[in-house]
Amino acid sequence: MLWVRVYGVEAEVDNSSPTSLLITSLLIKRRRFECRWIFGAMRSAVWFLVIQLLFVCYGTIAFAEQRRPNILFISMDDLNDWVGCLGGHPQSLTPNLDRLAETGVLFTNAHCVAPACNPSRSAVFTGRPPNQTGLYRNEQSMRQVMPDAVLLPDFLRRSGYWAAGSGKLLHYFIDAQSWDEYFPPKETENPFPKHVPWGSRPKTLPRAGEWQYVETDWHAFDVTDDEFGGDVLTAKYIARQLAKKHERPFFLGCGIYRPHEPWFNPKQYFDRFPIETVQLPPGYHPDDLRDLPPAGLRLGPNRYFDHIRRHGQWREAVRAYLASIAFADANLGRVLDALEAGPNRDNTIVILWSDHGWHLGEKQHWQKFTGWRASTRVPLIVSVPKGVPGLPSGTVAGSVCDQPVDLLGLFRTVSELCGFTTPIDVQGHSLLPLLRDVKAEWPHLAYTFLGRAGSVAMSGLRHRYIKYANGDEEFYDIENDPYEWHNVASDPDYLRELGEFRQRLPESFVPIR
């Protein structure tokens, strides 16, 4: 119920839904006028003001409700900066990511909250960082660590939105309580649509032992996209929702699984990258470990990279990753085509992000889990149409922002764009100032929390800092050294900048739970 009080007149209004906000719902509870008849005219004037005030309030609320924007929230899995508009690899083919970037703001210095799926995605959907929750690793359960957390889609549902999703948005579960609808059905708690049978495995890379992740493998399936399934079915479900009108504003979560392993894709995407032309990662340096502290040396070289090279599969693996990116981009294209052709184009915010990056040999490392830029830098694109409550002018198409941002701010950003008050426990910095003006003052750093309490990577406009729990440090001048080949933590020329980062370390770290 909504209470209005003007000059002693109290009114109770039923505001359970926008349509119930009618003048006929005004129920006068008390009248406190103890005036003589000579004040009758004044009393009439007060009543007139009350009625006008309610008309204004109802009209404003109804208009705001009508203009609540839809949210299309797209995640890609394990996608680093090998995207055309980010320039991470010269051969990457991402026409749909690139065209989405042309419609809004591309953040070129965006970083994940954690370089692992579970803590990264949990932070995005709760707005709470690992150092405050104690969720640092994939092996943990989000609901055991945060049993009462309200996820972003559920927050919007409680504010009148319809929330639906498909594919991997959280770490291998759906969290049925947070959604109105899901594909596959939310009751299964399995976010993955069916795909073509994999058959016998491994397909390409031999298993070296129990330590090797079974999904570290790649293969070209000679099938059509429709026959392959998986992400194709996710994209088609989201496309169907975008093609129709909805009674309520919607939040659509689209979880595109590629380029996550296994790098199994339709053959046509491998064919785009003839093996003899494939270039190895531009960030690879054969002597890139000489200046790392002990903690960095323990995190860098791993058995995967040695195993892949020993079997002569490095170039083939790079090709498979490029093919997986191209397949993911094609499915993004299906979603964008449906949005552009449907009835929701002019009132839908599109936000695309990746949960973290991926190493393909940089620092002698394979996979993720590190504090280096190959593992933390991610694509982030935000496109906002005009007329949105939090940003009436919308975003300027084709804008590029180089300021350091992290994905923790996405919850708050969505909330403010929709015109809502953000829950008090949600952390992170809203991106609205940068969406209004990519050159706006931005005093913040981007924080990436590693798999152990006390270990963190911090990204600025020009420098990056890694502080390990044991006290080891790395410092990089990414303006002059974008691949982080030279650790300058002990260089006196960088002492002032290093000191500034040290002063901005997180104040506390909750132990792993």
Image (cartoon, helix red, strand yellow):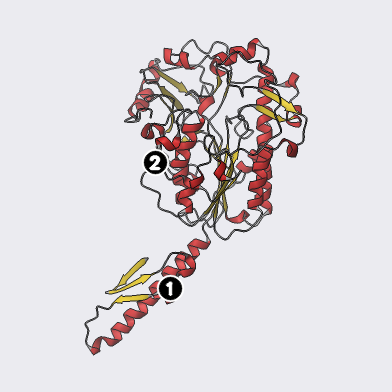
Looking at the rendering, which quadrant does residue 191 occupy?
top right
- Residue 38, placed above or below residue 288: below
Residue under pointer 2? 427
Tell me the element at label 2. loop
Residue in the image at 65% along x and 35% along y: 328
Looking at the rendering, which quadrant does residue 498 occupy?
top left
Q: Quadrant of the N terminus?
A: bottom left
Task: Mark 2: give few (<14), some (14-19) or many (20+) Cα within 10 Å.
Answer: some
Tell me the element at label 1. helix
Task: Mark 1: give few (<14), some (14-19) or many (20+) Cα within 10 Å.
Answer: some
Q: Nearer the viewer, residue 134 or 449?
A: 134
**Image coordinates for residue 54, horizontal then vertical, percent:** 40, 72
- Residue 479, placed above or below residue 51: above
**Image coordinates for residue 413, horizontal then vertical, percent:** 46, 46
Tell me the kind of residue under disc 2.
Gln
Tell me the kind of residue under disc 1.
Phe
Q: Nearer the viewer, residue 163 or 331?
A: 163
Residue under pointer 1? 55
Query: Which of the marked residues, 2 or 1, is nearer the chain's N terminus?
Result: 1
Separation of marks 2 and 1 at Cα, in angstroms: 36 Å
Q: Quadrant of the C terminus?
A: top left
